[in-house]
Image (cartoon, grey):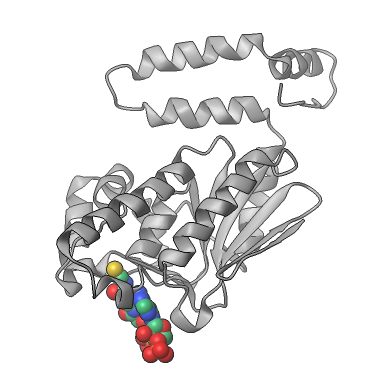
Amino acid sequence: MSLAFDTLLLETDESGICVLTINRPDKMNALNSRVFDELDLALDEVLSNSEIKGLIITGSGDKAFVAGADIKELNTLTDNEAEAKSLRGQKTFQRIEDSSKPIIAAVNGYALGGGCELALACHIRIASANAVLGLPEVSLGLIPGYGGTQRLPELVGKARALELIMTGRFVKAQEAKEICLVNEVAEQDAVESSKTMMSAIIKQGPLAIAQVVKAVKEAGKENGYKSEAKLFGDLYNTADFKEGTSAFLEKRKPDFSGK
Ligand code: COA
């Protein structure tokens, strides 16, 4: 399957792993309005196409994942337009975080500003050895506007997040792993490592994976444990649960239908 976009490439392999490549290599894959519109269309396709089991997001070329929001576009906005732009970007990134299908960011180079925020919205981040992550918006006289001030503290803790956002300093792959900003540094290629991890995830019950996303979203919130119990119970009404437990008892591999 291959859909045509101006700023994205979308390719799904026979196992159901879709790779979405942000494709503006001459602009370090910076996120302009067109990219956001196309990201929404691509997410519509990924979420509705039952042949797609999981999504990997990466950037074109070997220099950048995404070097941020398009600074040329940001430069001309009024305050109200800037607020609207922030809300617009937040909405698309929230769709990524809330996706019922697993999403991994293969961070293959610079992931700065909006690019770092895109990676933060994904469920899992795998960095290439040359990856560099950071939220340098203060150097432009701005703050992160696509969820960075909210998601970074969740991953690295409040103090470290404040340090990184206030200094705007760049974090290389190994340090990013040490502070839990990325899950793993790929030995060779970030997309290949992401595919390996995704293969392990899409073997599991897809409805269970979707419930994991909902349950973990409630972590640390007042009703977290209650939500977990409800989501756990809901799965008892699915064919996937019956198949998973039967397969274990019958000493065979499960064949999940996603129903
Ligand atoms: N928005 C728009 N254009 C961008 C961009 C961005 N966020 N990041 C890079 N580009 C463009 C550059 O303007 C340049 O375009 P040009 O060839 O038409 O002049 C092209 O991409 C290549 O970038 P360049 O800066 O020449 O590459 P480099 O290897 O010297 O540096 C970076 C790479 C990523 C360190 C540098 O481009 C950078 O700092 N980008 C901005 C990062 C940032 O502040 N992001 C937060 C935005 S909110």
Q: In this view, does 148 lie to the left or right of 63?
A: left
Q: Percent position (x, y) of residue 166?
A: 15, 62
Quadrant assignment, res 194: bottom right
Q: For the point 49% across and 32% down, which residue is it?
A: 213
Q: For the point 65% across and 39% down, which residue is it?
A: 48
Q: Percent position (x, y) of residue 57?
A: 55, 58
Q: In this view, does 176 lie to the left or right of 145?
A: right
Locate the N terminus and report the quarter of the image it occupies.
bottom right
Q: Is residue 184 left or right of residue 239?
A: left
Quadrant of the picture in which ligand 1 is shown: bottom left
Q: For the point 19% across and 61% down, which residue is it?
A: 143
Quadrant assignment, res 73: bottom left
Say if 182 sits above or below 222 in the image: below
Is residue 228 or residue 38 the one in the foreground?
38
Q: Percent position (x, y) of residue 117?
A: 36, 56
Q: For the point 37% across and 15% down, which residue is it?
A: 225
Say if 17 sits above or below 62 in the image: above
